[in-house]
Image (cartoon, rainbow, N blue to C red):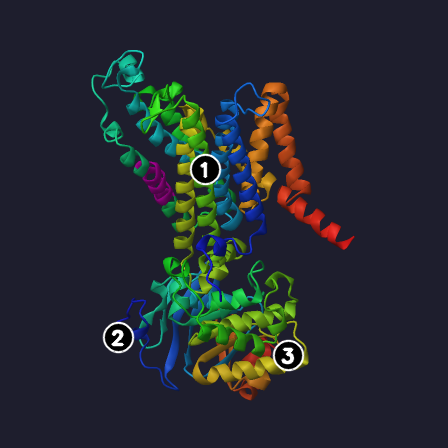
Amino acid sequence: MKRQPLVLKILENDKGGKIVLSTLAVVVFVVAFCNLFVPSDSIFYISTFTVTILGKYLAFALLALALDLVWGYLGVLSLGHGAFFALGGYAWAMYLMRQIGDRGVYGNPELPDFMVFMNLQELPWFWYGFDNPLFAFLMVGLIPGILAFVFGWFAFKSRVTGVYLSIITQAMTYALMLAFFRNDMGFGGNNGLTDFKDILGFDLSSDSTRVGLLIITFIALVLGYLVCRFIINSRLGRVVISIRDAESRVRFLGYKVEQYKLFIFVVSAILAAIAGALYVPQVGIINPGVFSPLFSIELVIWVAIGGRGTLYGAIIGAIIVSFASTYFTSALPEVWLYALGALFVLVTLYLPKGVVGLISQINSRVKKA
Amino acid sequence: MKLLKHENEQNIGDLKKGDRILLVDGVSVSFDGFKALNNLSFSIDYGELRCIIGANGAGKSTMMDVVTGKTKPDEGHVTFGEAVDLLAMDEPSIAHIGVGRKFQKPTVFANNSVFENLELAMKDDKRFFKTLFSKLSSEQKGKIEETMKLIGLTDLAYQDAGILSHGQKQWLEIGMLIMQEPKLLLVDEPVAGMTPQEVENTAEILTNLAKDNAVVVVEHDMEFIRSIAKKVTVLHEGSVLAEGSMDAIQNNEKVRKVYLGE
């Protein structure tokens, strides 16, 4: 057998993944190039606003990928994945806050603006260390990972499944939202964390930083995709699919189902958290609204529309729906939520395999004709 | 004798033909006041093929649930091999130590291929961090192919198991049981939906398996039981009504009364 690079081996039988990732690579390249190297009065110029929007979509795509891993393959419908995304975002936002230094409105070199406003005298203990980007990056993965581990440990050990599990994931994100809304929590309450100035020494308002963030987000998405695909291609992936289809039968074959579930759940939470950390510098703010159950449900809709259990379908769904959301919320704001709801119902009824399923259906018809 | 709760294969002891491999001792299970098992006691020897019969609700499935760890009884002991306490273990540990089960309703993994179903059932290290990187050795591949030949599904190796017919799923389940290499096989209605030829093949396979293991078959098909069983246990209302050769059972007064309805 010929030796191939690992990347090609992982994507060996994954036509959809190859198409989606290479299309995105071209789009990201064109957008980056037309933003940085085309003069701003040319018709080929692409605005920095578009760069940022695309970066946001790609962060959402990574989040959708994380959800597809637990929902599409493990069969655990998490209605609280926004929580891991938000925690990752908050952890990275804390680093960005510390980077502001004395450039805040109050000019306090030690404390972020909202703490000065709240009359805090010194930095709360849980803000220590976030000056250091490496520490902050570690926390991006660690905190949501630990939450997912503890939550999953109790939920899976007590064999909570199906709709009950979905409800408690929803309760988890709702509880976190309420907690983060409180000013005393020390995370900026209602207003969240914002006014970031720079990241790792680069000015956040400059075009090249924006393009850099877009490219890093794209690379993270590709790596996330490869990790998920590697897991699904392994024997562990086949065990996970079997757990989705016939959980108790898997136990009688000698597999410790709880450990498998926990592993996938934690990996997924960490991917979601990294997506959150990439989302924050591009959007420029994080507030407790990201914990809202509505957001977590919306991302379920992304995956459903794209096509669950395919990985690349989740990416397609996240990008299509976010794009539509950006367009409609400015063009027809009052219609959008109804349209989203209707879309979800229609997809569930008529396209159980989402857009991806539709495409492969059309493909096979064309081949027959 | 002290029962060992260790999930260690050494505690099974050195099994020789005729040694006791399974002891169910005074087991009672009740669901909402209904006694599914009532002080049930019996034992199975290594190298034995035992048939268990009984009317619906006699406790056959509950007995299997108890032995495989799905149901915890209110009272009693279940000992595997020399001194392994099955009641202290969960389903995966019991499966790992060497108890295999084929369900009444064939449950194969619909979205995995026939080959993958057998791969998943195969006796191997089943901890999650091992399965993430595990690769099939040529020896393992050979074993899967051999099993596919035995169960007649070689041509369907890479088809999803979900498209198989009922009879083919039955075969696949038997194949999975073989791949598991259990020491004790609990087989629930193996020949339902099979043609006479297939029934004959199944009988042969089970008889062969029983030589180096122990096989417990629950079946309704009396002809099938007659063709394979040396010893039959009759369950009734959660306990053993009679035990013996097929002829002895059929001439047993009590059995005729409750089971054969005479």
The residue that mark 2 highlights is B1
Predominant SS of the magenta segment: helix
Residue A68 rendering spot, x and y as whole percentages: 51, 44
**Quadrant of residue B153 in the image?**
bottom right
The Cα atoms of the two marked residues, 3 and 2, are separated by 44 Å
Residue pictured at 28% horizontal, 70% vertical = B3
Examine the rendered structure and indicate whether residue A163 appears above or below residue B18. Answer: above
Examine the rendered structure and indicate whether residue B259 appears above or below residue A210. Answer: below
How crowded pointer 2 is (Cα within 10 Å; few <14, some 14-19, many 20+) is rated as few
Who is closer to the viewer here, A62 or B262? Answer: A62
Do discs 2 and 1 share a chain? no
**Quadrant of residue A172 in the image?**
top left
Q: Amino acid at mark 2?
A: Met
Magenta region: A139-151
Which callout, 3 or 2, points at the residue further toward the start of the chain? 2
Task: Label 3: state its secondary structure.
Answer: helix
Chain ID of residue with mark 3: B
Residue pictured at 43% horizontal, 74% vertical = B182
Disc number placed over residue B198 in the picture, else none: 3
Confirm whether residue B32 shows in the render: no
**Quadrant of residue B213 in the image?**
bottom left
The Cα atoms of the two marked residues, 1 and 3, are separated by 49 Å
Residue pictured at 45% horizontal, 37% vertical = A81
Are the residues at dot 1 and dot 3 in contact (C-beta closer than 8 Å)?
A: no
Are the residues at dot 3 and dot 2 in contact (C-beta closer than 8 Å)?
A: no
Which mark lies nearer to you, 1 or 3?
1
Q: Quadrant of the N terminus of chain B?
A: bottom left
Q: Quadrant of the C terminus of chain B?
A: bottom right
Q: Amino acid at mark 1?
A: His
Chain ID of residue with mark 2: B
Which mark lies nearer to you, 3 or 2?
3
Residue at the farthest left position: A122
